[in-house]
Image (spheres, rainbow, N blue to C red):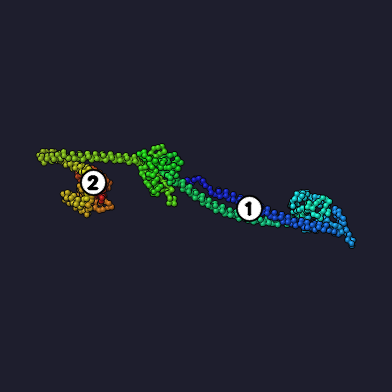
Amino acid sequence: MSDTPRIFDGTASVYRNLTLVTIAWTLAIAASLAWNIGLQRGKTLDLAKNEAATHIGKDFAFRVWATSHGGVYVPINPKTNTYPNPYLTVPERDIQTPSGRQLTLMNPAYMVRQMQQSAITPFGVKGRITSLKPLNPNNAPDAWETVALQAFDKGTKEITEVTELNGKPYLRAMRPFITEKGCLKCHGHQGYKVGDVRGGVGAYVPMDTYLAAEREAIGRLSITHGGIWLLGLMGIGFVTRRNLQLARERQTYTDALRLSEARVRLLLDSTAEGIFGVDPAAKCIFCNRAALEMLGYPTEQDLIGKNMHATIHHTKADGGPNPLDECRPLAALNSGGDITANDELLWRADGSSFPADMSSYPMRRNGDIVGAVISFHDVSERKQAAQALAKRTQELERSNAELEQFAYVASHDLQEPLRMVSSYTQLLARRYQGKLDQDADDFIAYAVDGATRMQRLINDLLTFSRVGKRGKPFEAVDSNRMLQDVLEDMQFAIEESAATITHDELPTVQADPGQLHQLLLNLLGNAIKFHSAQKPAIHVGARRQDDEWLFSIRDNGIGIPEDQFERIFVIFQRLHSREEYPGTGIGLAVCKRIVERHHGRIWVESELGQGSTFWFTIPVEARA
Ligand code: ADP
């Protein structure tokens, strides 16, 4: 039983769940981190874009301002790298102040480019102005700018890109600038109209600080996510530990349950009693091996789910149907009590039947009957044995009756010829005693003695055979008076042996008076006959014990060896020779028959040389 297979391993599923939940948790945290990093990156880009937009806007403002004034005159100054713009072909490009200072007209593009190259560079943001049709070749676009400018022509409002400049990260942004009226002064000859995309203004925004802030934020995000991930793992670990504990407990319970089931199964299968269980619809839910064998089914599965009444208990012994509502064993399903049903007929799978004693016990759950357990055993052998016994008893009774009849008839019919033999031998003795020779006297004496003994034997046998046959109905007999009658009959023997006979107050009993007389006569006669050297002292006692009167006849005679206590009640069994004590060995057998006819018992207690006590009982209520 120790190798009961484990069907359920709860811990495996807990470990499987642990793996799944851990993976899911890690993925969720990773996704959240990635999403947050993405957000952060977007924010970084937005900040840089904003800065770029600010610069571009400022450049626009300068440009718009300069355009609105048709450019500005500034002193020509090599220190500030300010020279007349060779690409500007307008009248009065270069003028002289009254004091003689040389001024040159700075067109907006020139002005903005100079501002971008010199004044703004120290702030880290580099400006850029470009056009697909530059007047100044320095303003020619690079490859990215060319693509951007072409996109502006198609309506795009802003182009950005993160790139590297001199090994450092920069955001490069560019917006289109639109031809205004003031632009046409210089660029009208190029074919621009008001509203056309003239070119693009761009800015390079250094990203280092933004990226540093971004790295810091991502670091913080990573730490918080890591912390949350760890907390989650701890939670998962905690829950897993609890689940493992629960799974182990469940495993323990399951193992215990399976062990107990296996024990019950073993118990069921090791008994010779057929046992099966049914649900409330009388359908089989289990069945032990003995039941299968007795009913002739190979496996339990052949009966499981079948209506047991319809399968094994459907027909009565007379061949008539056995209705379910008359099924005594299954009544346990309704009555709720234990039921014993003897001599039921059960049907085997092969169509044969056998008698069975059945017991059924209801199964309860929370007070409701949920089925019944039914046990049964084949009583064919017992029935056969009982029948055989009944037959033998009958035969025995018949042969006893015949024997009794024979003994009665023989002893009765022998009485008459015997009486003649006895009378005539006695007559012979009286008439010829001393007149013939000594031998003749002896022979006659032997014949007389033999005839007398035979007469006694025949009488005793007749008495014995009459106990059963010629018994009288029971009546109330006062045993005190009965004892007095007996003592009167025994007067001679009492006087001769100088016996003293005492007695208790004796009850009135239900008995056959003649037989009670015979019983007392035999027992008291023996008590006097088997006296020792002392004078016989006899006591007749009686007391009530439960439903019986218990009589005792106690003497102080020779006693009886213990190993003979039973034997002396058997007919013709004597412990002494005729020379020692006369008798036929029938007296106690007669006593036994009389007591048994009165439904009582008789036995002796004795100690050799000390005396004997004969006990007998007579039921208080007559049962004749
Ligand atoms: P019987 O008296 O004719 O011999 P019983 O059947 O009355 O036959 O007794 C059977 C034997 O039991 C007797 O032979 C005797 O040995 C023994 N027995 C009966 N009663 C007594 C008694 N009161 N004391 C001693 N022995 C007894």
**Nearer the observer, 195 or 225:** 195
Q: Secondary structure at mark 1?
A: helix
Q: Secondary structure at mark 2?
A: helix
Asked whether, in this view, residue 272 is left or right of residue 439, the answer is right
Amino acid on which the number 1 mark rests in the picture = Ile
Amino acid on which the number 2 mark rests in the picture = Ile
Would you name the residue on which mark 2 appears? 594
Residue 350's spot in the image, x, y percent? 41, 37
Asked whether, in this view, residue 346 is left or right of residue 24, the answer is left
Q: Going 18% across and 39% down the picture, which residue do you hit?
A: 413
Asked whether, in this view, residue 239 is left or right of residue 494, the answer is right
Residue 316 drawn above or below residue 556 = above
Q: Going 81% across and 55% down the picture, which residue do you hit?
A: 182
Which image quarter: residue 297? Answer: top left
Residue 601's spot in the image, x, y percent? 26, 48
Give yes or no for contact between labels 1 and 2 (Cβ–Cβ under 8 Å).
no
Q: Residues within 10 Å of mark 2 (few under 14, many from 20)?
A: many
**Nearer the observer, 270 or 225:** 225
Q: Which mark is residue 29?
A: 1
